Image (spheres, coloured by chain):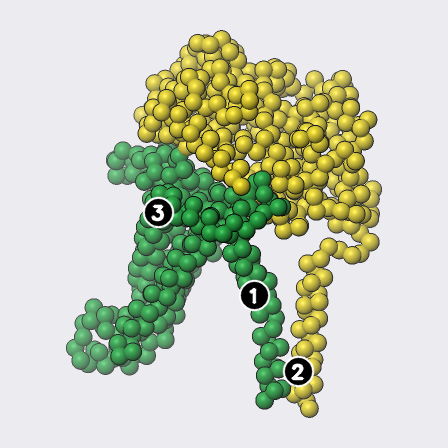
Chain colours: A green, B yellow
Amino acid sequence: MNRERNIALWFVAPAAIVIALVVVWPFIYNLILSFSNMSLLHIRDWQLIGPRQYQKVLSEPRFYSILGKTLIWTVVNVTFHVTIGVALALMLYENVPGKKLFRTLLILPWAIPPVVTALTWRGMFHYEYGAVNLILSKVFHQTPIQWLNDPIGTFAACIVTNIWLGFPFMMVVALGGLQSIPHELYEAARIDGANAWQRFKTVTLPMLKPVMTPAIILGFVWTFNKVDIVWLVSNGGEPADHTHILVSYVYRAAFNLYRYGYAAAFSVLIFIILVIFSLVFMRRMNKAENPAT
Amino acid sequence: METWNSFSSFKFQVSSFFLLFLLGCSHSTSSVIHLQLWHQMQPEDRAVLTKVVDQYDEQHPSVEIELIYKETEELRSSFQSAALAGLGPDLIYGPSDQVGPFATMQFVRPLEQTVPAERLAELDSNAVVHFRDHVYQIADRVGNHLALVYNTKLVPNPPKTTDDLIRIGKEITRDTNGDGQIDQWGIVWNFTEPFFFVPWLSGFGGWVFDGKGRPSLDTKADADAFRFVKSLRDDYKIIPPDCDYNTADVLFKEGRAGMLINGPWSWAGYEKAGVPYDLARIPQVSSTGLWPAPMVSPLGYSICVNTNGKRLAETGKLLNYLLSDDVQREFMTATGIIPSSLKLREDPSYLLHAHMAGSLAQLEVGRAMPIVPELRAVWDALRPAYQSVLGGYLSPEAAAKQAQKSADEKIREMNEG
């Protein structure tokens, strides 16, 4: 028994050590910094100052406005990722002509580095030379929109870019889930006279839930923390620092203004928000699946 | 028994893997010293740097140099993180405004012991960047200043004043293919970025700091400069409605802009693109009679505080080589830099570069870029205000007030204890 336990420990050890080095230690260090005054003037001689940084973050109205924007960003993105991903997975699951080609094309956004995607989309939203306005004006005869000079336009541009980038992941997950649903269930539903919508609602959706739940939680966490797209499409929060989500704001505080203690407290709060969301979401999903518990 | 043997073998493999992993993480212990240089040089400069470093590598088999390019902002943030973690490159190359924060945070070393005083005396005094009584950066070039770049085919004579600029701009801004859209612009530049706004701010009599080193953004000059840039776009319509760095660069390279405001890092690219161009001063502001003063800053090398012992000695040798006249001459002839070596400026090849005269004319009216960390707060305060004026959300006066308030606040936050 002891020997077996030793073998197990040795198998787990490499992963445990790597996780301790790259996840646990940075997390603990960040937690310590969040209670410190580490900043430009106190980079080497920082001291613990208690919860002052947390008080500062929570007393700023800006925190709440950016939190609101981050929630909109996350919910809109994840909703579109899941809806488009599941819809495309259903289409690809059927025997459509050119299925392999479509599958490859639809996975492409996922395969392209996000930096390239972000900068390409930024170019596409250019007022005069961008493809979006050219289509609007030449094809639909609409007035071009100042996408990147307007806070709402820039935010919308960031969301569109991230939707394009994110749906393939949900599509691949949903496709995997669909392939694991036994055909007998659909046959039984057909015999019972269920139409396509009823089959989707009573067979596909419940069977996809166990696969999609972790994917949605991951999607939520990733999107909530997705700094690169917002940063690159909005060119660092433009116009006028209006296009920030919590993580891009933290990045600016840490690396532009050298407020490490403040940024650490800010990031711990982001972590807490995400932990609460994940726990609540998982509990609700579990309840929905097992109403008796 | 067999299971136990395979388990022992597995243990051995895991231990070996970690040993190798840890060795990989540590600095090389072999006789070859691996040095890293992080820089933000543009492709034309990068080619010269690679060439001179390859030559050094050949002459010094005991040293291996790795060049890593990072965009200016990424260079700063990555260096901050790396230096804080006790790592980082041995040498970092970039503009002088990074010296203030890096020296304050003790991420870079004083260089007095590394480069001999005699060599420092041979360099332009602006190239030896001091911060609180120590030298923290030594530049291989000075300038890095914005100037007016004009397409000689579209603009045979550059404008002398802003009135001329508007007149010429109106003449050459046009719809060339009759589709109802402007295809050729009078002047372009990255007009949403405050660094490019500074020449206009100074042209209207302002500057980013006052005499006591405090931000001075809530001024008439600031509001007037905001108004002027906006009028070029909205009233005179000689600049595009939306123009960032890349748009301006491409428009000029494609011959779709008569004039451009950009710095030395870009000029070789216009030559390569086959644009017939020359350099001139950014036009004098007609209403004030002042020449716009772009920020002038050296570009140079600093040594990371985490470089020690033998590595430090080798880094010092490399630094002296990179600052040598031979290396500066390579850059000067290839990309037209203004070398920091005073001796090289007497070299006949110095003024041979086609655009050196225009660059020097602009340099004469430039102003040294402050290297204090507070400059970062000024940029961050100025950018939103400036963009709010261009977006039509704030009046120039309100934006100037907001910029001042925001800069004061950010400096207070940066210096919080």
Residue drawn at (44%, 57%) of the image: A271
Please indicate, yes or no, whether residue A167 appears anywhere in the rendered image: yes
Q: Nearer the viewer, residue B391 or B270?
A: B391
Q: Which disc is residue B70 wearing?
A: none
Residue contact between numbered discs 1 and 3, judged by CB atoms under 8 Å: no
Are there few (<14), some (14-19), or many (20+) residues within 10 Å of tag 2? some
> Which residue occupies 63% across, 31% down?
B96
Among the 4 quarters of the image, the one containing residue A279: bottom left
Disc 2 chain ID: B
Q: CA distance from mark 1 to mark 2?
A: 23 Å
Q: Are marks 1 and 2 in contact (CB under 8 Å)?
A: no
Query: Left or right: A164 with respect to B267?
Result: left
Q: Amino acid at mark 3?
A: Tyr
Q: CA distance from mark 3 to mark 2?
A: 55 Å
Query: Mark 1 sits on what residue?
Result: A19
Q: Which residue is mark 2?
A: B7
**Residue A71 coordinates in the image, percent (x, y):** 34, 52
Task: Have a look at marks 1 and 2 and say if they share a chain.
Answer: no
Residue B97 drawn at (x, y percent): 60, 31
* Mark 3 residue element: helix
Q: Residues within 10 Å of mark 3 (few under 14, many from 20)?
A: some
Chain letter behind tag 1: A
Q: Position of residue B340 (x, y in %)?
A: 71, 25
Q: Quadrant of the N terminus of chain B?
A: bottom right
- Mark on residue A64? 3
Q: Mark 1 belongs to which amino acid?
A: Ile
Q: Are marks 3 and 2 on the same chain?
A: no
B59 horizontally vs B328: left or right: right
Does residue A191 sit above or below B375 in this rendering?
below
